[in-house]
Image (tube, rainbow, N blue to C red):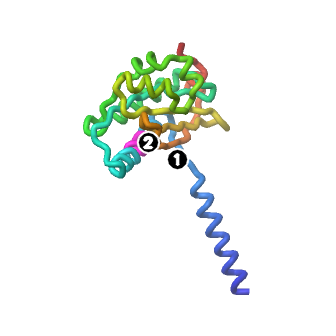
Amino acid sequence: MKNSIALLVSLFLFANCASGQGTRPKAKDPNAAAATIASELRYQFLSSLKAQGGKLPARLGILDIINEEGKSSQLGRMISDRLSKELFDPKTFILLERDRLNQVIGEQTFQETGLVLSDQIVSAGKLSGAEYLTLGQIVFQDQVFLLNIRIVSLGGVICATADILFDSDDDTYSKYKESIK
């Protein structure tokens, strides 16, 4: 009987712990999401760089955030802009001009790669002087947005990754659907 009770209590505690690990942080809007995710990315990046013996400041290229179809949208551009502002810290990152990176990579290559660090993106990053790139995707699901961003070295090492949910409204959804040409 005591063993059965102990087993039930253990299972209950395990279930509560396991369900807590699967939850994602949630922000009220895209700006709050970018601020939260930037803080997490910076923390992880600095920890990763310290463990690898890397040097600061790191040269970071922030690419447009794409949707699940591999296309840039007004919402993705807006979040990328906000992420640039949030990550700006001359002691940590030297930020590279995103428009130049996007031109070098080209829309076709970007649509084909999504969140994958392809040879074309590595070449474009090297041409622009980047050591690291952000790769991001935004997905609309169940009336909320999921934003996922990674900082990846040009060697293919994921140095930081974070995701967050944020609420949808009509204006945010219309920006999500509006493609950038």
Question: Which quadrant would residue 116 be assigned to in this image?
Answer: top right
Q: At 50% from the left edge and 17% from the top edge, which residue is drawn?
A: 106
Label ID, residue 25: 1
Q: Farthest residue toward the top?
A: 181
For the stretch drawn in magenta, what is the main secondary structure?
helix
Mark 1 closeness class: few <14, some 14–19, many ≥20 residues within 10 Å: few
Answer whether labels 1 and 2 touch (C-beta < 8 Å). Answer: yes
Give residue 180's position: percent from left, percent from top.
53, 16
Question: Which quadrant would residue 71 be assigned to in this image?
Answer: top right
Q: At 60% from the left edge and 53% from the top edge, which residue is drawn?
A: 22
Give residue 52's position: percent from left, percent from top.
36, 49
- For label 2, the SS is helix
Residue 151 appears left or right of 15:
left
Q: Farthest residue toward the bottom?
A: 1
Image quarter of the N terminus: bottom right
Residue 51 in the image: above or below residue 100: below
Label 1 sits on what residue type? Pro
Write the start and end of the magenta stretch as one range: 37-42
Residue 32 appears in the picture as rendered: no
Label ID, residue 36: 2
Residue 104 in the image: above or below residue 92: above
Give residue 130's position: percent from left, percent from top.
36, 29
